[in-house]
Amino acid sequence: MDALLTQLRAAAEPTRIRLLALCARGAWCVSDLVAILGQSQPRLSRHLKLLVEAGLLVRTPEGANAWFQLAPDADLARQFLARLPEEDPLLAADRRAAARLAAERARVASDSFRRHGADWDEVRALNLPGRAIEAALLDALPEPVGRLLDIGCGTGGLLEMLASRIEEGLGVDASRDMLALARTRLAEHGLSHIAVRQADMYRLPLPDGVFDVVTLQMVLHYAEDPAVALAEASRVLKPGGALIIVDLAPHQRADLLGAHAHRWPGFDDAEMAGWLGEAGCAAPRGETIPGDLPVRLWRAERLALSVSA
């Protein structure tokens, strides 16, 4: 009862209701919320602190910023937000301001990509069979899917595609510009059960054994040490959880190592099986996705942790 009363008291204030309504639609940092609501940073920081302490919002640090989003288990907040009238003038004005800010954030991120020549849609850039890759990924997912982690999520395309199949999703990427576009994409589609955050795939800031599925799509051929990346992916999987990898099979396109900064010219089944075995996973099942460049999908399960006698 105490936890319920704490949440009710935390939510029962006009500004905090506005904050919850915004954070239910996407992730925002304090400076964003200052711009949207037109209130001072100290005032909003106090409100956000109360909402986080009550378990209604989650706070995710990222560099000098912190991002706020509705907590996955904040069912009480979702219930009373569903009762708010869509036509309320204040809430409608907040949504319009948030949409303008998200569009500007996406524009700045896109400009940054263009200035630095980054090609963040690799499936399209390499003329890979996008629809066939999507279909193979969907077929590889277990039923049902609980918590999913997408490592190297980029602009959030895979998370968006899988949104209807998962209870809770998290994407991690090293690029803040990509994450800015991912947050805009997720907010535009109202995918409040999915979040993204900045992280190093070699040192994931996540506890052991908390995800049902981990995906890495077109990530490993950029990795300096794929074995370490796979070990981290396996570490955060629950025993019996699925690790799904989509990447290039061995190829002769030497130009990709230079023009696209690939570290590896694809992977064969033997080396993938070796790395996954060292990471504590069962032997993977692989399938080929035909196209101009050979693509493979590997699916492996995390083995149960051994118990010492």
Image: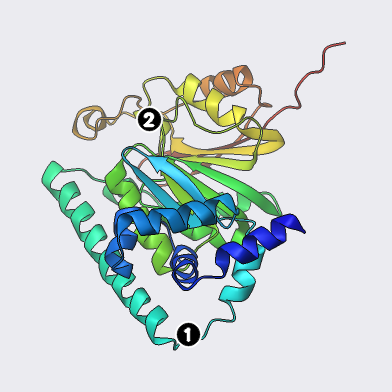
Query: Residue 221: x and y, percent?
Result: 38, 30
Q: Residues within 10 Å of mark 2 (few under 14, many from 20)?
A: many
Residue at 15 percent of width and 43 percent of height? 117
Question: In the shown orientation, is residue 86 left or right of residue 105?
Answer: right
Classify mark 2: helix, strand or loop: helix
Q: Residues within 10 Å of mark 1 (few under 14, many from 20)?
A: few
Q: Is residue 239 visible?
A: yes
Residue at 34 percent of width and 80 percent of height? 93
Q: Is residue 126 visible?
A: no
Quickly name the residue at label 1.
86
Question: In the shown orientation, is residue 257 left or right of residue 22?
Answer: left
Query: Camera-side residue: 301 or 176?
Result: 176
- Most extreme residue toward the right, as rendered? 309
Q: How is the model colour-coded?
A: rainbow
Quickly name the residue at label 2.
221
| Numbered tag placed on residue 54 in the rendering | none
**Circle 1: residue type:** Glu
Query: Residue 245: x and y, percent?
Result: 52, 37
**Circle 2: residue type:** His
Query: Residue 35: x and y, percent?
Result: 27, 64
Question: In the shown orientation, is residue 89 left or right of residue 1?
Answer: left
Quadrant housing the N terminus: bottom right
